[in-house]
Image (spheres, grey):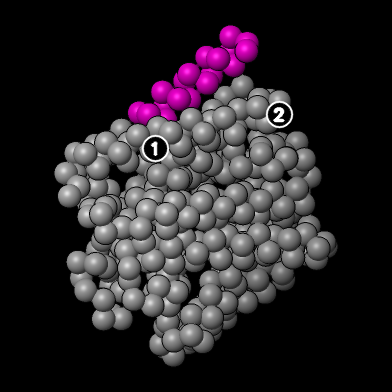
Amino acid sequence: MTRPALRSALVGIVGTALAIATLASLPDVGGRLAQGFAGLERVRLAWIGIAAVMFFAMLVAMACAWRVAVSACGSTLTRREACARYGIGSLVNTFAPFRLGDAARVAAFARALDDEDGVWVAGGALGAIEAARVVSVVLLIVIAWSIGAVPLAWLGLASLILAALAGVVRFVAVRRPGGNPRVARLLTAVRELAKAPRDAVRLFAALEIASASRVLAAVSVCLALKVASPVVAGLLLVVALELSGQLQLTPANIGITNGTVAIALTARGIGLDQALTVGFALQAVETLVGIVFGSAGVIALAADSRAAVRRWFPIAVGVAGCVAFVTVASLGVLGDFS
């Protein structure tokens, strides 16, 4: 092992530990994480583990969607490199409000483009991904309505969202960049994906896998906490979280996620205490997975070479996962689980 690689790994590991410690020390965050796993003797821990795996799969699928979008613009990123860059955004979103992680992802993916306007091209890739996600959310609402998870009024909301997206797409399609070349660069991803329907299908498939993974994670948390009708509840939660997640006012959406979950579940007749516990647990698992994934990305990119990414990303995931496990165990002790 070379000295720079060892130094980068140590920096990443220490950074992971400090990041988790900082999250736990924020006002009321440590208590909320602990409360999310309160009553461990009544929690099916295997389902919590499955939820963590599903959240991890969601992040990988989202990273693959980014890879497809930037590859259409000329990038040659591998899947591991895309995961590392996407993970940096997940780590930033954990500690910063207003979805600043998206800006971090744009900057990280822009470095993979051999283009002086790479930031504009990567920003356009983000726009293309967000547009495709709108369609994915609409499909999710339709599925949720078909099994009785959401009322008929939500179909109206889905129609409005789809109509708004159609209007934006039409505006972009007829707009001429004029004398501003950067506007043209911003639309690169959309134009390239339109020329290659196969890539567009791959992008949408990756987003659908991410959406399905998040649903399975939510269902797993509901099963772990013995929520009635876990499939219906999990699908309802993801629809609500996808809509509320567009407005991230706090780091890791703390407070907003819990409130959204509580409102969604109590509307279905689930007790407030159980609804709050589900919200805390769901956010705790997703946040810790995001920290592990993002910290691994930071470590993997520290040496800034493809060989380093291939070597360090899986190792970093394991190390950061161990740190997260120890943190959860510590919170369990400090929270006086009984």
Give the residue at x 24% y 63%: 276
Q: Residue flagged by tag 2: what amino acid is it?
A: Arg
Label 1 neighbour load within 10 Å: few <14, some 14-19, many 20+: many
Mark 1 or mark 2: which comes first in sequence?
2
Kindly tell me whether residue 253 is visible in this rendering.
no
Q: Give the range drawn in magenta.
A: 1-18
What's the CA distance linking mark 1 and mark 2? 26 Å
Query: From the viewer's perspective, is the residue at label 1 or at label 2 nearer?
Result: 1
Q: Residue 28 carries which label?
A: none
Q: Which residue is drawn at 35% across and 28% down?
A: 18
User: Label 2: few (<14), some or many (≥20) within 10 Å?
Assistant: some
Q: Is residue 68 above or below residue 112?
A: below
Q: Which residue is denoted by mark 2 in the rendering? A: 306
Q: Which residue is drawn at 49% across and 66% down?
A: 215
Q: Residue 324 carries which label?
A: 1
Residue reaching furthest bottom? 152
Check the picture and name the quadrant holding the N terminus.
Answer: top right
